Amino acid sequence: MTFDTKKLLRKVPEVTAVFWIAKLFTTAMGESTSDFFANTFNPYIVVGLSAVVLAVALTLQFNAQKYIAWIYWFAVSMVAVFGTMAADVLHKQFGVPYAISTTFFAVALALVFAIWYKVEKSLSIHAIDSKRREAFYWITVMTSFALGTAAGDWTAYSLGLGYLVSGIIFTAIMILPLLGYVMRRNEVLTFWAAYIITRPVGASFADWFGKSTSQTGLGFGDGPTSVVLAILLIITVTYMVMSRRERREELR
């Protein structure tokens, strides 16, 4: 199948309240799912397999000629899982402090934004209508997930704030750009700021539910937490698919 790379239908969903809910569920699920598999099985095998599934998800997304809810959110979910692993591998396997990995991914994300803007002259998600812009979009999403994971672990572990406090702090931070986006104040900046911060918000609360009480968590376990979050995400995406707005987007 061939594509006109100069003119593709828009490949991302409308940014609604349900979009942000789904985004938070994917960030939280990515954290708990990654931790469950990495702590239960050989982490090298798990990382390799997740990379394969991520490649499949992104292939489906790039080959789709328009926005399809299930494919898009499958790709986001796998980015969440792999992004978590990318940040955790630096710390757990190579001993890189969370403060350093947070700084590294922040610089990497800034570079991605700079290159994207230099090439495309826009960072707007409303202009994801070419293969190149879509590639920039997913590189940004991947880097933002890794950054959010590192930042959440940095505040919870290194700064000793714990998961709940970290989650509350990041939620308070996220509210500001989210309100700015709703009020249409510099929509590109406020969207990406809120999008990036949803990662440590979701990851912090997922860890709070899943980790043991000795780790400042509630002790429900990463596995059960991941299953519950996956169910909530499926319900949310199903609602998206059934809603009139999503139907219109997929029929365009």
Image (tube, rainbow, N blue to C red):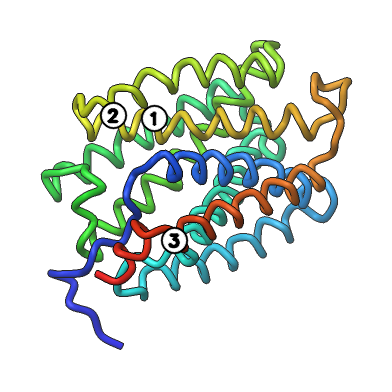
Residue at the image position 40 percent from the left and 35 percent from the top: 195
Residue that mark 3 sits on:
72
User: How dense is the environment of label 1, judged by Cα within 10 Å: few (below 14), some, or many (20 and up)?
Assistant: many
Secondary structure of residue under mark 2: helix
Q: Which amino acid does label 1 sit on?
A: Ala
Residue 49 spot, x, y in % from top left? 67, 64
Q: Which residue lies furthest to the front in this view?
A: 244
Image quadrant in which the N terminus is located: bottom left
Q: Which residue is drawn at 55% across and 54% down?
A: 77
Give the camera-side residue of 101 and 171.
171
Q: Quadrant of the C terminus?
A: bottom left
Decide which of 237, 230 is in the foreground and name it.
237
Q: What element carries label 3?
A: helix
Q: Is residue 16 left or right of residue 39?
A: left
Q: Who comes first in sequence, dot 2 or dot 3? A: 3
Q: What residue type is labelled 2?
A: Tyr
Spatial CA span between label 2 and label 1? 8 Å
Identify the residue position indicated by label 2 in the image.
181
Position in image of residue 95 (x %, y %): 68, 31
The CA distance from mark 1 to mark 3 is 19 Å
The answer to which of marks 1 and 3 sits earlier in the sequence is: 3
Residue 165's spot in the image, x, y percent? Answer: 65, 14
The reply to whether the C-beta atoms of the residues labelled 2 and 1 are less than 8 Å apart is yes
- Name the residue type under label 3: Tyr
Residue drawn at x 60%, y 57% as measured from the top left: 234
- Determine which residue is flagged by label 1: 194
